[in-house]
Image (cartoon, grey):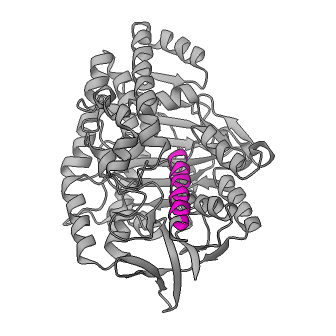
């Protein structure tokens, strides 16, 4: 019998395998695709290298902690380059603003952009700093295990300050009370999209996100984001993790309320004492555990929470360079509120979306041929809802044309005629390739003051011996939070194995 079986070789499952194998446990890692990394993947085609998921590394100290725990030095394996500017913002009135890795440079940019708002910028970062000081320990750096008495007894001092987290105003309300400049309101409202939520619904607590990015900076690994997965997979092999790719799990087997193992689609059974699911927790409820109670729980979760947004992605190899663009670029729509009403109320793609464009070649020239650009284009779109009339197999071409045209109007002249490689991703691909429930990128959204308590716990409350890791569970999505999730889950598994020994 396997001590620990991990279903899904995304970043969370891979890192969980490292912690547990390093602690001396026999670990088997099952991945349905022919590669590890999940959404953190890569495409190489025609000399172009494209990131397929995350395009920036924040909170690098979390990654450094992983390497230190494994007895490694991060600088021996990864060349992390600071990205500066962190982002270049383009507004519908034709103005633009750079935000730097260096706060002094950022303040100088703001002085030129709108000197009356420099103090407002500092004020909102201080707000995020206060939230971080209160919320980071209970909600980021420690496992909830399950939301039970132990969690509340452990963190009662922080929870008594819950009101200081500003949970009962929306992010948009807090931002509007701070800035007068509508452009800067858009800059800070857009951070709600980091977890697939709406700034008009998500609590002001999420001012923690711009605080982290603006004060702790952002980095990019030389060779592309997938370099991180390649290094961690190398560590897993060295530690003796049994990695089995192209292994599709049909069902997680449960007897008398506890896991027994998994059945693969080929009919074979692998027994296990503990199972870590690194696939969307809601997808586990729906597809991998046939239980009426779990299905009921799933329906209750969906009823009381919005699903996070999905993504519409274009990977474009372009026979042209754009000197006016940076590594990370945001082209804002004219009416931000209308955009989010389309996504969360009408559940349709925004007619005029905000567009994110990443050109990783700006940081690493080896990722595209000379005289070309590798564009990763992302637009937020709604997850797949029941009764949806969106036929992405048809609509993706129309939406692709709309986005390319919008970018050409924004200054990317000749874009369409210079595309020599193209790949389109819709919510259907995210659901099929990565098991993302309804194609959502982060599981449940954070459109509620209670969203942190509504996320599926790291330790499954309904099935003994089952654990969740990754962006759909605690503490949330994004590379640093998934790394923290893996550390939390591996600690829970080790605690429980010692108890049962």
> Which image quarter: residue 254?
bottom left
Percent position of residue 171, x then y: 30, 31
Q: Can you say whether 147 is above or below 213 in the image?
A: below
Verify whether residue 108 appears in magenta. Answer: no
Q: Nearer the viewer, residue 398 or 205?
A: 205
Q: Nearer the viewer, residue 237 or 357?
A: 237
Q: Is residue 422 visible?
A: no
Left or right relative to 281: residue 478: right
Q: Can you say whether 299 is above or below 379 in the image?
A: below
Q: Nearer the viewer, residue 125 or 355?
A: 125
Verify whether residue 488 appears in magenta. Answer: yes
Q: Can you say whether 2 is above or below 401 in the image?
A: below
As drawn, the residue found furthest toward the top would be 116
Question: What residue is shown at x 50% (from left), y 64% (from top)?
Answer: 496
Percent position of residue 488, x then y: 51, 53
As drawn, the residue found furthest toward the bottom would be 267
Percent position of residue 75, x then y: 78, 42
| Boundaries of the magenta span | 480-498
Main secondary structure found in the magenta portion: helix
Q: Can you say whether 318 is above or below 176 in the image?
A: below
């Amino acid at each position: 019998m396997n001590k620990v079986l991990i279903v899904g070789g995304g970043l969370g499952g891979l890192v969980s395998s490292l912690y547990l194998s390093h602690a001396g446990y026999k670990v088997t890692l099952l991945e349905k695709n022919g590669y590890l990394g999940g959404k953190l993947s890569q495409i190489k085609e025609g000399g172009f290298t494209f990131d397929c998921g995350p395009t920036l590394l924040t909170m690098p100290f979390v990654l450094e902690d992983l390497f230190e725990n494994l007895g490694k030095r991060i600088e021996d394996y990864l060349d992390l380059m600071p990205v500066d500017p962190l982002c270049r913002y383009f507004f519908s009135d034709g103005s633009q603003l750079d935000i730097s890795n260096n706060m002094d440079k950022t303040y100088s940019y703001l002085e030129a952009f709108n000197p009356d708002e420099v103090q407002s910028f500092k004020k909102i970062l201080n707000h995020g700093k206060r939230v971080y000081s209160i919320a980071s320990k209970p909600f980021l750096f420690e496992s909830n295990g399950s939301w039970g008495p132990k969690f509340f007894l452990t963190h009662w001092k922080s929870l008594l300050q819950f009101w200081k987290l500003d949970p009962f105003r929306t992010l948009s309300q807090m931002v509007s009370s701070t800035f007068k400049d509508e452009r800067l309101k858009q800059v800070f409202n857009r951070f709600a999209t980091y977890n697939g939520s709406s700034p008009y619904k998500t609590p002001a607590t999420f001012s923690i996100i711009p605080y982290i990015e603006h004060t702790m900076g952002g980095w990019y690994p030389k060779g592309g984001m997938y370099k991180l997965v390649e290094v961690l997979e190398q560590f897993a092999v060295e530690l003796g993790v049994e990695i089995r790719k192209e292994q599709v799990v049909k069902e997680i087997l449960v007897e008398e309320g506890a896991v027994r193992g998994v059945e693969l689609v080929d009919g074979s059974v692998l027994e296990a004492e503990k199972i870590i699911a690194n696939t969307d927790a809601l997808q586990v409820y729906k597809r991998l555990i046939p239980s009426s109670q779990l299905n009921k729980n799933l329906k209750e979760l969906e009823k009381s929470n919005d699903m996070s947004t999905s993504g519409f992605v274009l990977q474009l190899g372009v026979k042209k360079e754009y000197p006016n663009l940076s590594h990370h670029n945001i082209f804002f729509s004219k009416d931000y509120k209308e955009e989010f009403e389309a996504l969360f109320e009408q559940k349709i793609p925004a007619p005029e979306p905000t567009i994110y464009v990443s050109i990783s070649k700006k940081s690493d020239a080896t990722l595209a041929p000379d005289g070309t650009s590798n564009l990763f284009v992302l637009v937020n779109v709604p997850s797949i809802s029941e009764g949806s009339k969106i036929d992405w197999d048809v609509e993706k071409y129309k939406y692709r044309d709309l986005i390319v045209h919008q970018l050409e109007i924004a200054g990317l002249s000749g874009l369409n005629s210079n595309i020599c490689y193209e790949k389109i991703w819709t919510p259907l691909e995210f659901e099929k390739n990565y098991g993302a429930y309804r194609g959502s990128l982060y599981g449940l959204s954070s459109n509620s003051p209670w969203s942190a308590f509504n996320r599926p716990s790291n330790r499954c409350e309904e099935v003994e011996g089952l654990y969740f890791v990754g962006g759909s569970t605690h503490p949330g999505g994004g590379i640093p939070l998934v790394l923290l999730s893996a550390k939390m889950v591996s600690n829970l598994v080790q605690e429980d194995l010692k108890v049962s020994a």
